[in-house]
Image (cartoon, rainbow, N blue to C red):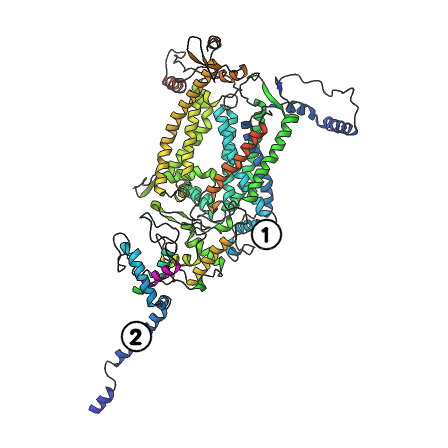
Amino acid sequence: MARKGSTANRRHPMATVALIAIGLLFTGGGYALFSSTATAETSTASQTTIDEGKKLFAANCASCHGLDLQGTGEGPSLLGVGAASVDFQVGTGRMPMAMQGPQAMEKAPQFTAEDTEALAAYVASLSPGPAVPDDSLLDAEGDATNGAELFRINCAMCHNVAGAGGALTEGKFAPALTGVAAVHIYEAMVTGPQNMPVFNDKNLSPEDKRDVITYLKYLEKNPSPGGYELGSLGPVAEGLFVWIFGLGAIVALTVWLTAKSN
Amino acid sequence: MSTVTTPETAPAPAAAPTRPSAPRSTSSRFTEAAANYIDERTSISGVVKEFGRKIFPDHWSFMLGEVALYSFVVILLTGTFLTFFFQASMAEVVYNGSYVPLKGVEMSTAMSSTLNISFDVRGGLLIRQIHHWAALTFIAAIGIHMLRIYFTGAFRKPRELNWVIGFILFILALAEGFTGYSLPDDLLSGNGLRIIDGLIKGLPVVGTWISFLLFGGEFPGTDIVGRLYSLHILLLPAILAVMLALHLVFVVVHKHTQWSGPGQTKDNVVGSPILPMFAAKAGGFFFIVFGVIALMGTFFTINPIWNYGPYDPSPVSAGTQPDWYIGFADGALRLMPPGLEFELWDRTWSFNIIIPVLILGGFIVAVLVYPFIEAWITGDKREHHLLDRPRNAPTRTAIGVAGVLFYAALWGAASSDIIATHFQLSIEGVIHVNQALLILGPIIGYLVTKRVCLALQKKDREIALHGFESGRIVRLPGGEYIEVHQPVDEYERWKLIDYNDYQPLMIRPNARGQITAVQRFRAGLSRWFFEDRIAPVSPKELESGSGHH
């Protein structure tokens, strides 16, 4: 019986559990590794860049965001915002802010590209977050039709169908998208700066984002076939134009026609 | 320029006068033969004689109605071209035309055919844009024409009915504009229709029924574009054309109004006869108006439906507005304060829609019947063929300005979001300011305008009596300095002193010796109109006044 018992217990009672645990560890870990590859790119940044970024951060950002990115009463925590967020906010001049307001205003960038990169590398080194997108997603050579449709459904209610921008509540607004670099459009979609919602990769896949950029760049590259766009603002601009210039010209002509010769 | 004064009843010279001396060229002989041929078969000479001798006075503001007429002609011409290619169907198709970002997208036939007009029909986009710009110009021209009529008092007897016809034309033009805006079935037009659907559904009891009737079921359905198309190209233009003809017939019947001036009285019209002078000028002016509209259509994009994409009830673009002429209605909805809603007896009672609709309806009716109200208040039953300078009717002008400001506040509110983004304001602030302006604007505008008018009248009076300040200072032998005033010449002075003077009505008992409440009310209104007034200079004052300085 004892022998029989020993055969029966050739495997340790915990073996099944251990096997499952190992299996889970491999699949889960593999999945985690695989799915985090997109955000792991910044780890390639060299330690010197990160150190450089740390110094810049302490000098320019820490007064509001805290020395450890933990945030203060003046500014939010930057833990987990990722390199993409830093590159967007600093690269478009929104950060550092000139003043508190309904939202950070775009202005001339305050840092060089290298400094921006260093800041981004530093912030990304402390906690993972969305990375600066790969150039292959920014070539604006995707499907403009799909991009146009996605843009109308997801973006146009704030940014206007032609990307001319629009008003939000309490002085906030969705800015115009003409002239915005492809990388910044992409980063805005992944990080949701200011009052913008985040469009993560499950919502709009990287390919979809590339299509949206393609459409916006299409609009930029192809001026309206109908002539000057009047700011693409829609009927308000058209109405103002017809009253001021159209009717203005016609009334001036009536005055000219009925003027008495001197 | 030939200026002709005719009493309209002047006997015309006998027909076919012969020119004894001039040798006849072949062409004139042909013209005569042709004219004779036509006249013998149509008796048209009577009409030409009567109509061709009609006089039209010359003033730039008298040409604004013409602008509306000519833009309507442009709309008819371009619209006819568009009907060749537009398909008013909401059947789903897959777009396969030239515009790349919409290729392969499912849309209605209406949208797809509009895109084809824009990108695949030769000259289609140009004609579409001319049509749309002409429509905006048409309604804007009606607007300023109407303002001209109002502020010069050209709506007074005998022209009250023509004011009403003109106002109906304005409403028809709005309807034409809105139905046209809704036809392409793009995102913008669909959103516009959705707002109309909401307006209709906001009407108590009948709203939902009317909405289902109009859209053939639940919004948006598959019927609405076809129905609006029938209205847009058939019913509305037909009514509009008939009303327009009637409007013009009345202009001929009443004769055109004119400004007061030397030799220009209520019994004559001074200006150019229709044939040949006025007809030639008007013909040229038509092409000028057409030209301006064509230039706008050539160089400026209007309604880029390719950006808006096909209608889908879920997306609404930022900056979604109606065309300018419906803006006042959109603005009324935006200005409505929230929270006018409660639940009672198992259902929701919402006043958010019905209140603006009633206010707009009241405003429209007030404009429509204004001539009758003013006639009743003044009690003036005379015919008026001479125009008022706006300052000489201070209360009317002030009411007009108040109305314009009321409209402007509603109109401006429709672009509250654009104002907010472009001037970096908060949209709530813009709305609140517009709400205040809607109430305060007309009141302040009324008071200021009335005072300005009275001040201008005073100034006129001063000039009529004492002349202009010449700037020449003279020292008299006694040491006194005076500025020499230069008297205005008689022609100029006539314009300053010739206007109607009204006095507040006295309350008088009626035949039964009673003073009714209505009469009291009327006398009150009359006081409001004419209590503050500057009387025109009388001949007596003129005689004694001109001796001064």
For the residue pair A134 and B173, the one nearer the viewer reads as A134
Q: Is the residue marked by circle 2 packed among few (<14), some (14-19), or many (20+) residues within 10 Å?
A: few
Prevailing secondary structure of the magenta residues: helix
For the residue pair A95 and B363, the one nearer the viewer reads as A95
Residue drawn at x 36%, y 42% is: B425
**Magenta residues, start to end:** A110-124
- Position of B366 with respect to A74 (left or right) is right
Q: Amino acid at mark 2?
A: Leu
Q: Residue B464: where, in percent of width, then height?
A: 48, 15
Outermost residue toward the left? A2
Q: How many marks?
A: 2
Q: Give the quarter of the figure containing the N terminus of chain A.
A: bottom left
Q: Residue A114: where, in percent of width, then height?
A: 38, 61
Q: What residue is disc 2 on? A: A25
Task: Using the image, name the chain to which the residue with label 2 belongs.
Answer: A
Task: Using the image, name the chain to which the residue with label 1 belongs.
Answer: B
- Against B116, residue A242 (above or below) is above
Which of the 4 image quadrants contains residue B248? top right
For the residue pair B446 and B377, the one nearer the viewer reads as B446
Q: Secondary structure at mark 2?
A: helix
Q: Secondary structure at mark 1?
A: loop
Q: What residue is disc 1 on? A: B120
- Against B383, residue B427 (above or below) is below
